[in-house]
Image: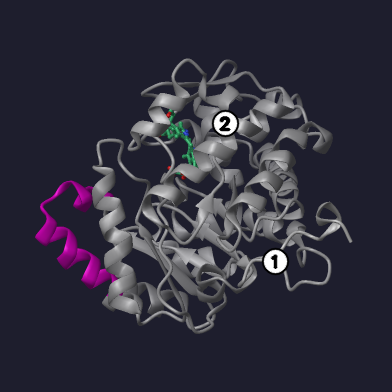
C-alpha cells in the first residue's frame, strides 16, 4: 500500500478522550483542563497582526484566517481546547441580516427588530451557506490532533438582544419591553434563532467539533421566572435539535454559559447542558450546590484578576481550583472573556499553574 493511501494516523489519544471531554462528562481526568473564553483575539499580538486590514465578519468567513487565529492561543498557551474563531452574530450575517462588528463597540444591526413584521421578515439560515464553516472546522480538527475543538453559537435570548437593541446594551430595556408586549412574536423570534443556532452548531459537530458551548451571555438580566418561561424553552430547543451527536457516538458534551446567572444556575443546567459555565460572582462550591451533582462546572476566575500582580493571580487561581473540586467535573476558565489589555504571558502562566496544581 502506498503512503498516500494510508489512513491518517489516529492521534495517540483522540479528542473524545481528552481531559476537556472527560471533565465535561464527569469522568476522572489526568489534570484539570483549562481554556479561556476569548483566548483568540486582541490580547495576542499575532492576532492583531493577522487581523490588520480585514473586517471581523470577513475574517470569520475565511477558512484560512479562522484556522490560523483559532490555533494561535493553542500554540502559545498550551490550553486544553481550541474554540472556533467566529462570532455569535455570524449565523444572522450569513442568513443576510445587515450587521457589522464595529471595532471597540461590538455588533451593530442596521435595521433593528422593533415590530412583529420585523420578526416575520428575518431571513432563515440556509445550511448550504455554511460550507466555509465546515471547511474551517475540518481543517482545524486535522491540525489539532488530540486537542479538542469547541464549537459554539449564541443562544436565542442573547442574539435577540442585539437584534432588538440594534447593538450592545446595558439594561436591555427594549428587549424586555418587546418580550412583555409581544409574547407571541417574541416566541417566534426565539424559535427562529434557536433553529439557526442549531444549524450553526450541527455544522460544526458534523465537521468534527468535540464539544459545543451555547453562549447566553446576557441572560443574567432576567428574573428566574421570566427566564424559565420565556427563554429556557428556546435554549433547550437548541440542545434538543443537536440530538445525540455524530452517528455511533454518545453526542458531544454541551456547555451552557451566561454572565450574572447566579440566580438562574439550576435553570441554566436544566436547559440541557453537561457543563454549566459560571461567572466570578458565585464561588464554584456554591455553584455546585445550586447546579447539583448531574452536571460539571466551567469557570470562574475574574478576568480582571489577570491584570493584578502575580501573587494575587496565583492565590485566586488556587482558590478557583480548590472550590472547583466540589463539582462533578471542573473545566477551568475565566468567568467571562479575556480582557484585551491582558498580558498573554499571564494566561500561559495560569495554564501551567492549573496543570501543576491538579496533576
Ligand atoms: O476586532 C476584533 O478583534 C473584534 C473583537 C471580537 C472578537 C475577537 C468580537 C466582537 N468577537 C470576537 C470573537 C468571538 N466572539 C469569539 C471567539 C472565540 C474565542 O473565545 O476566542 C467568541 C466565542 C465570541 C462570542 C461572542 N460575541 C459573545 C459571547 C461571548 C461573550 O463575550 O459573552 C458575544 C456577546 C459576542 C458579541 C460581540 N462580538 C464582539 C464584541 C466586542 C461583542 C460584545 C459586545 C457587547 O458588549 O455586547
Name the quarter where the C terminus is drawn: bottom left
Check if mark 2's residue and mark 1's residue have beta carbons within 8 Å.
no
**Where's residue 302, x and y in %?**
26, 55
Q: In the rendered view, would you say 353 is above or below 222? A: below
**Where's residue 252, x and y in %?**
67, 65
Q: Can residue 169 be seen in this view?
A: no
Residue 264 picture quarter: bottom left
- Neighbour class for label 2 at 10 Å: few (<14), some, many (≥20)? some
Mark in front: 2 vs 1: 1
**Residue at point 28%, 69% (across, down):** 320
Q: Looking at mark 2, is its residue's CB closer than 8 Å to ligand 1?
A: no
The secondary structure making up most of the magenta span is helix
- Element assignment for label 2: helix
Magenta stretch, residue numbers: 303-321
**Where's residue 213, x and y in %?**
56, 55
Q: Is residue 75 left or right of residue 121?
A: left
Q: Can residue 131 be seen in this view?
A: yes
Q: Which mark is residue 161?
A: none
Residue 251 picture quarter: bottom right
Q: In this view, does 70 lie to the left or right of 128?
A: left
According to the image, label 1 marks what residue? 10
Residue extending farthest to the front is 2
Residue 60 included in the magenta stretch of the image: no
According to the image, label 2 marks what residue? 65
**Where's residue 162, x and y in %?**
52, 31
Q: In the rendered view, would you say 323 is above or below 259? A: below
Residue 304 included in the magenta stretch of the image: yes
**Residue at point 37%, 53% (across, down):** 77
**Residue at point 48%, 70% (across, down):** 266
Real-space Cα distance between discs 2 and 1? 26 Å
Q: In this view, does 346 lie to the left or right of 221?
A: left
Of 6 and 89, which appears nearest the observer?
A: 6
Amino acid at each position: 500500500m502506498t503512503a498516500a493511501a494510508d489512513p491518517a494516523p489516529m492521534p495517540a489519544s483522540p479528542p473524545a478522550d481528552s481531559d476537556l471531554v472527560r471533565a465535561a462528562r464527569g469522568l476522572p481526568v489526568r489534570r484539570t483542563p483549562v481554556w479561556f473564553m476569548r483566548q483568540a483575539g486582541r490580547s495576542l499580538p499575532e492576532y492583531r497582526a493577522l487581523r490588520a486590514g480585514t473586517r471581523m465578519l470577513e475574517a470569520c468567513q475565511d477558512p484560512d484566517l479562522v484556522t490560523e487565529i483559532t490555533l494561535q492561543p493553542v500554540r502559545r498557551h498550551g490550553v486544553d481546547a481550541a474554540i472556533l474563531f467566529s462570532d455569535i452574530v455570524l449565523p444572522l450575517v450569513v442568513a443576510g441580516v445587515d450587521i457589522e462588528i464595529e471595532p471597540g463597540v461590538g455588533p451593530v444591526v442596521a435595521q433593528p427588530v422593533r415590530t412583529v413584521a420585523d420578526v416575520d421578515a428575518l431571513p432563515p439560515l440556509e445550511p448550504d451557506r455554511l460550507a466555509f464553516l465546515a471547511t474551517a472546522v475540518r481543517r482545524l480538527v486535522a491540525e489539532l490532533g488530540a486537542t479538542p475543538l469547541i464549537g459554539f453559537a449564541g443562544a436565542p435570548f442573547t442574539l435577540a438582544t442585539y437584534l432588538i437593541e440594534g447593538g450592545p446594551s446595558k439594561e436591555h430595556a427594549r428587549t424586555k419591553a418587546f418580550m412583555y408586549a409581544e409574547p407571541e412574536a417574541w416566541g417566534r423570534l426565539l424559535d427562529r434563532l434557536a433553529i439557526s443556532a442549531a444549524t450553526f452548531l450541527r455544522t460544526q459537530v458534523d465537521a468534527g467539533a468535540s464539544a459545543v458551548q451555547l453562549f447566553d451571555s446576557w441572560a443574567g438580566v432576567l428574573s428566574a421566572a421570566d427566564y424559565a418561561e420565556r427563554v429556557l424553552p428556546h435554549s433547550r430547543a437548541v440542545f434538543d435539535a443537536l440530538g445525540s451527536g455524530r452517528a455511533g457516538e454518545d453526542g458531544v458534551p454541551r456547555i451552557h454559559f451566561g454572565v450574572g446567572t447566579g440566580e438562574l444556575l439550576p435553570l441554566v443546567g436544566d436547559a440541557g447542558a453537561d457543563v454549566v459555565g459560571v461567572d466570578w460572582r458565585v464561588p464554584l462550591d456554591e455553584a455546585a450546590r445550586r447546579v447539583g451533582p448531574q452536571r460539571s462546572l466551567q469557570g470562574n476566575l475574574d478576568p480582571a484578576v489577570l491584570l493584578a500582580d502575580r501573587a494575587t493571580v496565583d492565590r485566586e487561581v488556587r482558590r478557583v481550583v480548590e472550590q472547583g473540586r466540589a463539582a462533578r467535573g471542573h473545566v477551568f476558565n475565566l468567568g467571562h472573556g479575556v480582557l484585551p489589555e491582558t498580558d498573554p504571558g499571564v494566561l500561559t502562566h495560569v495554564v501551567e499553574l492549573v496543570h501543576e496544581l491538579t496533576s
